[in-house]
């Protein structure tokens, strides 16, 4: 009985080895050649196999997942845009995506960046054609077909792939269009009765939320505080807007005089939202601005570890300031 079971297991193992050898060396049937596909950043091996299946490169994801694991390459898959000139075997495909043999360059825009920072990164990228360098911000908006004239916050932070020599204006146009799609989708699904008159006002709020905290779990609560303040016609009193309004004069410190000096972005001296976004918000900040936490809180103060203490009353807030700010100093 044991001998028969051993023979069966051996036959199954041989069959598996034979199947994997056949699979690894049999050319894939691509929808067309040349064929391009993109592997996203942060994808797991299982996710990569599903992406390749969805892209039409693989018939099903499991065989390729097993092949990659058998070769110990599960952690070596590299994101990027890939070009297949002919029908590769799964083994050839494995080597391509683990060596990072990408067909296109990439550029990343990061949440919280200003448009000025975006332009600097574009100008430094040697693979791009720099058609925007001599243009003003308003001229750039005109070139990419944007309705708005102030570019701040209107571009979606993401990684964009492009072929060498592409115009930087084409990258900006893609990023601008991606933000419009993302923002409109969130706007259509927004929490009812929010104090925004337009998606643009929600984008302004999202930019403030983006700059106020790097903790994803706090974004809805931060948005909830600011929404409550707008509803009660309280000043937002948020430092990031003041800093943005200071421009190049900001030296890393914000002083009492800065809070008293009136600018269109000083939310300590003016009511309501600032006139434009103050940075490029990411998906999570946009979602938080349009789906804020239901809370009674009106105040928050930094604890010194990147998190915040939220309070519903001024007395509670003042106690928190003493505990987390004054005592720490």
Image (cartoon, grey):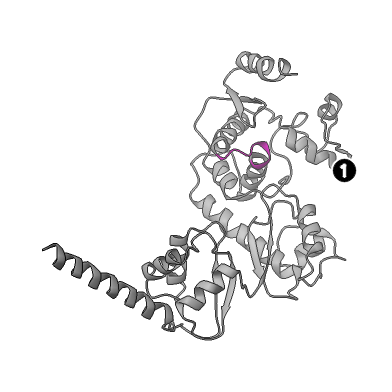
Q: Residue at x 67, y 19 (%)?
A: 324
Q: Residue at x 42, y 77 (%)?
A: 24
Residue sitting at the far front: 3
Q: How many marks?
A: 1
Apparent side of residue 39 relative to residue 117 in the rendered image (left or right): left
**Label 1's element?**
helix
Q: Residue at x 52, y 55 (%)?
A: 185
Quadrant where the image shows the N terminus: bottom left
Quadrant where the image shows the C terminus: top right
Q: Nearer the viewer, residue 289 or 81?
A: 81
| Label 1: how many Cα within 10 Å (few below 14, some 14–19, many 20+) | few
For disc 1, the marked residue is 248
Residue 134 is situated, as x and y percent measured from the top left of the image, at 88, 66
Apparent side of residue 103 relative to residue 129 in the rendered image (left or right): left
**Quarter assignment of residue 162:** bottom right
Q: Which residues are magenta?
A: 210-216
Apparent side of residue 82 relative to residue 274 in the rendered image (left or right): left
Apparent side of residue 179 relative to residue 18 in the rendered image (left or right): right
Residue 87 is situated, as x and y percent measured from the top left of the image, at 49, 85
Residue 192 is situated, as x and y percent measured from the top left of the image, at 48, 41
Vertical relation: 247 (above or below) 125: above
């Amino acid at each position: 009985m044991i001998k028969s079971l051993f023979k069966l297991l051996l036959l199954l193992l041989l069959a598996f080895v034979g199947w994997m050898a056949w699979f690894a060396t049999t050319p894939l049937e691509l929808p067309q050649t040349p064929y391009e596909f993109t592997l996203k950043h942060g994808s797991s091996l299982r996710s990569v196999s599903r992406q390749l299946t969805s892209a039409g490169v693989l018939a099903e994801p499991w065989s390729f997942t097993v092949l990659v694991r058998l070769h110990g390459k599960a952690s070596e898959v590299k994101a990027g845009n890939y070009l297949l000139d002919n029908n590769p075997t799964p083994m050839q495909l494995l080597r391509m995506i683990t060596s990072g043999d990408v067909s296109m360059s990439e550029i990343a825009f990061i949440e919280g960046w200003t448009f000025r920072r975006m332009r600097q990164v574009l100008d430094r990228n040697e693979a791009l054609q720099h058609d925007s360098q001599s243009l003003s911000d308003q001229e750039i908006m005109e070139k990419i077909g944007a309705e708005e004239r102030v570019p701040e916050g209107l571009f979606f932070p993401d990684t964009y792939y492009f072929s060498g020599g592409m115009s930087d204006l084409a990258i900006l146009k893609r990023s601008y269009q991606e933000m419009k799609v993302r923002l409109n989708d969130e706007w259509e699904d927004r929490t009812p009765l929010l104090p925004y008159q337009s998606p643009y006002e929600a984008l302004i709020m999202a930019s403030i939320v983006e700059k106020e905290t790097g903790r994803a779990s706090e974004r809805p609560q931060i948005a909830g505080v600011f929404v409550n303040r707008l509803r009660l016609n309280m000043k937002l009193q948020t430092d990031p807007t003041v800093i943005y309004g200071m421009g190049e004069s900001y030296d890393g410190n914000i002083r009492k005089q800065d809070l008293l000096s009136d600018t269109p972005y000083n939310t300590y001296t003016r009511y309501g939202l600032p006139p434009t976004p103050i940075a490029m918000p990411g998906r999570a900040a946009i979602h938080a601005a349009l789906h804020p936490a239901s809370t009674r809180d009106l105040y928050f103060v930094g604890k010194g570890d990147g998190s915040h203490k939220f309070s519903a009353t001024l007395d509670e807030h003042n106690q928190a300031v003493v505990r987390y700010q004054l005592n720490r100093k």
